[in-house]
Image (spheres, grey):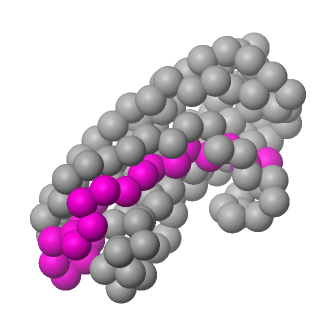
Amino acid sequence: LAVAAIGAPMTAAAGGRTTVTWTVENRGVGDTIATRWTDQILLSSDPVLGNADDRILATVARDGALGVGQSYGLSENVTVPIAVSGDSYLFVKTVPTAAMTRSQSGDTREPRSPKVSTMLRSSARRLTAT
């Protein structure tokens, strides 16, 4: 599974809510074995996913197998942390269950947004705190 696209508004108020949209694709060689996984929306102060500064803004459960070449799109309202300032990055990450191995999950690269002035960016969009 791979997150193919992330979308969010260009501006959001610190401490306010904003909507994040994303699309996940099965880029593997077969249908998913797992029928349940989660998608996490994360905020990072740098362009590196997986280090200590990442904050989970939301976790969204997904039920049902996904056939090879199939995709799904979701959206979630998240709260922008009040203490966030400067450049930040928005990520969406698919978290497989223990039954789904790395080889079954396909493309493990996570799309990320470029850096933002003041708040967060998504899919090459600037999100500025107001």
Residue 9 can be seen, yes or no:
no
- Quick one: which residue is furthest to the bottom in this view? 103
**Residue 60 is a magenta residue:** no
Identify the residue at image location x=27%, y=67%. Answer: 34
Visible residue check, residue 120 = yes
Q: Is residue 16 left or right of residue 9?
A: right
Task: Answer left or right for 93 relative to 21.
Answer: right
Q: Which residues, given as a range, are shown in magenta?
A: 25-45
Q: Position of residue 24 (x, y in %)?
A: 32, 54
State the residue at coordinates (33%, 66%): 1
Q: Is residue 36 above or below residue 115?
A: below
Depicted 50 relative to depicted 74: above or below: below
Task: Establish if 6 lies above or below 75.
Answer: below
Residue at the (19%, 81%) spot, across then down: 29
Would you identify the image quadrant in which residue 98 lies?
A: bottom left
- In screen coordinates, is 64 left or right of 82? left
Q: Quadrant of the C terminus?
A: top right
